[in-house]
Image (tube, helix red, strand yellow):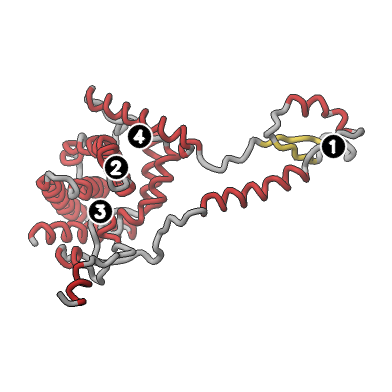
């Protein structure tokens, strides 16, 4: 056996995968285009910056924050000597040690007086990311999902600040292959849904469906290899939230939002063993788009700029799905 054959047996290490392979959790060969994208007749694009998890970045950031906070506390520490500070000595004893005193002028008093304000400590991490809170929250969410499935109820949406953070960290990647909706528009839908109800459609099944389908896609994208079984119930629970309102989407008047919702469900369904589910969802989305276009033509209404953009994007997504299905 020569050296070339020996070298050929050793797999090439790939340091960055294309966005399509990354979102579908497929092994990418690093080509441009890669073999998976060539086989699927899809656009092959790579992120502009490789995301790394270099050690020490988090702790260096914490040290920088602590280094900035400590001088601030020292500069605003209230002395114990006479004048107005003697009037506040009793107050200082009652205020928690981790609160910060900031002196400032009192507009209702003379210039010789000083008013004291207190600020709560600045959190370095959100509460739900703290080690003890994260595990507790995950167990509580899994219990809620299992209980909702058992009683055939909708699974409540997670807290709004958690969902907004999840979307900011995943939206670009999960929409890289099929651009259904812009992040700003999706965030507006998310805020409106939470304001209306976090436990059900609230008379807007299309909004409820697309939000839950995108949450399911984002959770699958963020799940580390080997942890699929741990979070599978949660992903499929939110996908189930979306599919539960499919009859409403099909029976109501066709709209761009209902088409986006059907295609978002199709994106998630393309990653599960039941391939017919994805085909069915794309077929219904295609029919809805035809009905929508026909309705606009008959009414003589001209689509606004944003609507025309989404109409074109959804047509491309449907064509891509149909081309991949026939390949």
Residue 157 has which mark?
A: 4
| Mark 4 vs 3: CB contact within 8 A | no
Please say whether residue 303 is visible from this viewpoint.
Answer: no
Residue identified by numbered label 1: 79
x and y, in percent, of residue 289 in the image: 18, 52
In this view of the protein, which residue sits in the foreground, 124 or 249?
124
Q: CA distance from mark 4 to mark 3?
A: 25 Å
Q: Earlier in the sequence, mark 3 or mark 2?
A: 3
Residue identified by numbered label 2: 227
- Would you call the spot at circle 3 few (<14 residues within 10 Å), some (14-19), or many (20 or more)? some
> Which callout, 2 or 4, points to the residue nearer the camera?
2
> Which callout, 3 or 2, points to the residue nearer the camera?
2
- Would you call the spot at circle 4 few (<14 residues within 10 Å), some (14-19), or many (20 or more)? many
In this view of the protein, which residue sits in the foreground, 84 or 319?
84
Q: Earlier in the sequence, mark 3 or mark 1?
A: 3
Name which residue lies at 16% across and 57% down. 321
x and y, in percent, of residue 135 in the image: 41, 33
**Can you say which quadrant of the picture contains the N terminus?**
bottom left
Please say whether residue 243 is visible from this viewpoint.
Answer: yes
x and y, in percent, of residue 155 in the image: 29, 30
| Mark 4 vs 1: CB contact within 8 A | no
Does residue 163 appear left or right of residue 257 in this picture? right
Q: CA distance from mark 4 to mark 1?
A: 49 Å
Q: CA distance from mark 2 to mark 4?
A: 21 Å
| Mark 2 vs 4: CB contact within 8 A | no
Q: CA distance from mark 3 to mark 2?
A: 13 Å
Residue identified by numbered label 3: 25
Q: Secondary structure at mark 3?
A: loop
In this view of the protein, which residue sits in the foreground, 84 or 285?
84
> Which callout, 4 or 3, points to the residue nearer the camera?
3
Q: Secondary structure at mark 1?
A: loop
Q: CA distance from mark 2 to mark 1?
A: 54 Å
């Amino acid at each position: 056996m020569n050296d070339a054959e020996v070298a050929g047996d050793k797999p090439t290490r790939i340091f960055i995968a294309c966005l399509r392979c990354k979102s579908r959790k497929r092994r990418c060969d690093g080509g441009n285009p890669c073999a998976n994208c060539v086989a699927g007749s899809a656009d092959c694009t790579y992120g502009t910056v490789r995301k790394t998890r270099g050690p020490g970045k988090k702790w260096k950031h914490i040290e920088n924050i602590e280094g900035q906070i400590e001088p601030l506390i020292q500069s605003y520490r209230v002395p114990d000597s006479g004048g107005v500070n003697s009037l506040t000595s009793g107050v200082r004893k009652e205020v928690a040690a981790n609160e910060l005193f900031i002196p400032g002028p009192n507009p209702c008093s003379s210039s010789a007086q000083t008013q004291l304000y207190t600020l709560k400590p600045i959190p370095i991490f959100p509460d739900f990311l703290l080690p003890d809170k994260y595990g507790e929250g995950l167990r509580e969410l899994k219990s809620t999902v299992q209980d909702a499935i058992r009683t055939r109820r909708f699974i409540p949406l997670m807290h709004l600040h958690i969902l907004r953070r999840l979307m900011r960290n995943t939206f670009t990647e999960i929409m890289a292959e099929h651009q259904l909706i812009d992040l700003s528009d999706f965030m507006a839908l998310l805020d409106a849904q939470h304001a209306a109800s976090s436990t059900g459609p609230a008379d807007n099944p299309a909004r409820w469906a697309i939000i839950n389908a995108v949450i399911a896609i984002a959770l699958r994208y963020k799940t580390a290899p080997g942890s699929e079984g741990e979070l599978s119930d949660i992903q499929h629970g939110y996908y189930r939230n979306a599919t539960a309102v499919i009859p409403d989407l099909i029976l109501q008047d066709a709209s761009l939002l209902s088409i986006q919702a059907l295609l978002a469900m199709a994106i998630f369904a393309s990653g599960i063993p039941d391939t017919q589910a994805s085909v069915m969802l794309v077929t219904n989305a295609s029919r809805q788009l035809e009905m929508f276009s026909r309705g606009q033509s008959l009414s003589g209404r001209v689509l606004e700029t944003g609507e025309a953009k989404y109409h074109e994007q959804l047509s491309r997504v449907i064509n891509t799905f149909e081309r991949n299905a026939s390949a």
